[in-house]
Image (cartoon, rainbow, N blue to C red):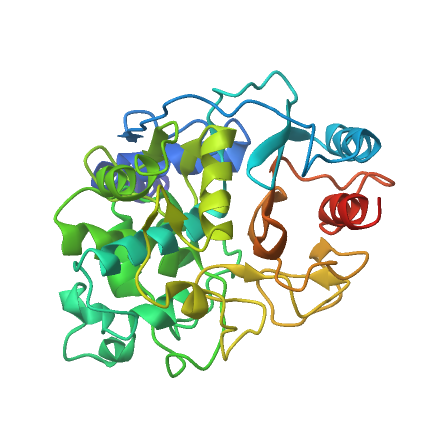
């Protein structure tokens, strides 16, 4: 009897080891990344993506000089105030552009103007601009084109009803993304960590709502934009991002992380650029998409871009709108004023303010009426008395300008 039990145990152990080996060999990158996250020994994309970086080439002529004198200058006491505020709240950079000049630039925690900054979900906002460039250049027919034109796996399925507009408005109709189910077999975990995320995001997310009717903040829809762009342009996402946006902006380059070497770009999370490259995108948007006398965007893009989504009035086309006001704004919920969210101690003082906003309070405020762009990068600040208030820096600067 004892020998029989022993043999059964050894057999089961061998089976478990065999299954484990098969799973590992199917996607070793996933298991490496999952181990880093599960054990707290690494964060992504700062580690765990080795060998999967794709260069995003830049074409910077020179960095902006800081000029804070003459018309458009910002009072020095306001700059000192916001710099101290940023420094005390785990910031890595703070840049302020006003009326055609860079008025302030400061880096913290050992960062400088050449350091690559992980923009977190600010990458989502960039992906929408690249979509506009592809529309402008004729690779994509328009916002209401079915996504299945490029994701052909969806043709003749219920997902064929999803348009590019639905993806940009975070209302594709998929099952909820942020389940926070961190098991290694969940779609949530695999869609981020797998070396074959395209298989997960194309096939494994079920359609549970009519497209366009329900908002869900999702990494999946943002990563699908890279897939669409790669298939539409027949170029890697990082290459087209460089050619269509970074180089025309005369910005410094960086890198975007792929799910595996020569794989699909994570266009929803993992773009690394120097601070000024992020700022130049905000300046472009403040100028209505024009640079060097040319418009980079499709006709009527800015109007479409800033039109509130039917499913979430605070979301345009992968861009956050400054209104409606909520004391706390949650990325994942519509109008949820309590619980987890970004604090807003007061409404934004500019009616036309819109913003890039990402995890870790990565934020860029854009106010076209004032030719004002403010970039803050860094980490979450939740310490008592040092909580991050999303309205503090822009409103402090706006008040200093309009109430001298």
In the rendered view, would you say 310 is above or below 97?
Answer: below
Q: Give how far across and how far down residue 333 sits, in percent.
A: 60, 68
For the C terminus, which image quadrant?
top right
Coordinates of residue 399 in the picture (x, y in percent)? 80, 49
Q: Residue furthest right?
A: 385
Residue 114: image location, x then y, percent: 47, 19
Q: Is residue 130 visible?
A: yes
Judged from this view, the residue extending furthest toward the top is: 110
Count numbered badges in the picture. Answer: 0
Residue at 52% over, 73% down: 308
Instruction: Quadrant for residue 247, please give it.
Output: top left
In the image, residue 175 sits, relative to residue 384, either above or below, namely below
Viewer-proximal residue among 7 and 222: 222
- Quarter-wise, where is residue 241 in the image? top left
**What residue is at 31 percent from the left and 58 percent from the top?**
132
State the quadrant of the N terminus.
top left
Residue 56 in the image: state x and y as whole percent. Answer: 30, 32
Question: Does residue 109 appear to the left or right of 402 in the view shown?
Answer: left
Q: Indicate left or right for 62 with 202 as reference.
A: right
249 or 3: nearer the viewer = 249
369 over 97 or under it: above or below: below
Which residue appears at 46% of the width and 26% of the height? 116
In the current view of this chain or complex, which residue is farthest to the front?
A: 70
Where is 10 relative to 252, above or below? below
Of 330 and 19, which appears nearest the observer? 330
Q: Is 363 situated left or right of 144 in this image? A: right
Residue 169 makes an appearance in the image:
no
The residue drawn where x is 37% and y is 56% is: 128
* For residue 268, side relative to residue 96 (left or right): left
């Amino acid at each position: 009897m004892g020998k029989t039990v022993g043999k059964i145990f050894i057999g089961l152990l061998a089976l478990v080891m065999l299954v484990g080996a098969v799973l590992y060999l199917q996607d070793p990158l996933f298991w490496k990344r999952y181990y880093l996250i599960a054990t707290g020994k690494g964060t992504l994309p700062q580690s765990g993506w080795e060998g999967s970086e794709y260069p995003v080439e830049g074409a910077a002529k020179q960095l902006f000089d800081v000029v804070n004198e003459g018309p458009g200058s910002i009072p020095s006491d306001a700059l000192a105030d916001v710099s101290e505020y940023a420094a005390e709240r785990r910031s890595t950079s703070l840049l302020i552009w006003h009326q055609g000049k860079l008025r302030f630039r400061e880096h913290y925690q050992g960062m400088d103007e050449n350091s690559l900054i992980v923009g977190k979900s600010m990458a989502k906002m960039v992906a929408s601009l690249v979509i506009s460039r592809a529309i402008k250049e004729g690779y994509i027919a328009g916002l209401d084109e079915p996504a299945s034109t490029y994701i052909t796996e969806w043709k003749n399925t219920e997902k064929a009803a999803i348009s590019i507009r639905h993806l940009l408005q975070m209302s594709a109709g998929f099952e909820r993304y942020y389940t926070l189910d961190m098991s290694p077999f969940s779609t949530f975990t695999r869609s981020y960590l797998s070396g074959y995320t395209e298989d997960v995001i194309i096939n494994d997310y079920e359609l549970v709502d009519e497209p366009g009717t329900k908002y869900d903040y999702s990494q999946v829809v943002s990563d699908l934009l890279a897939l669409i762009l790669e298939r539409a342009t027949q170029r890697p996402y990082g290459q087209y991002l460089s050619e269509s946006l970074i180089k025309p902006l005369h910005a410094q380059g960086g890198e975007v992380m792929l799910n595996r070497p020569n794989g699909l770009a994570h266009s929803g999370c993992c773009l690394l650029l120097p601070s000024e490259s992020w700022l130049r995108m905000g300046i472009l948007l403040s100028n209505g998409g024009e640079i060097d006398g040319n418009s980079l965007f499709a006709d009527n893009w800015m109007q479409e871009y800033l039109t509130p989504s039917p499913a979430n009035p605070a979301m345009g086309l992968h861009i956050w709108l400054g209104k409606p006001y909520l004391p706390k704004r949650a990325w994942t919920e519509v109008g949820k004023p309590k619980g987890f969210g970004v604090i807003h101690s007061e409404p934004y003082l500019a009616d036309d303010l819109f913003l890039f906003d990402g995890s870790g309070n990565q934020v860029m405020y854009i106010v076209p009426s004032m030719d004002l762009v403010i970039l803050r990068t860094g980490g979450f600040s939740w310490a008592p008395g040092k909580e991050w208030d999303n309205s503090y820096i822009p409103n402090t600067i706006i008040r200093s300008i309009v109430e001298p």
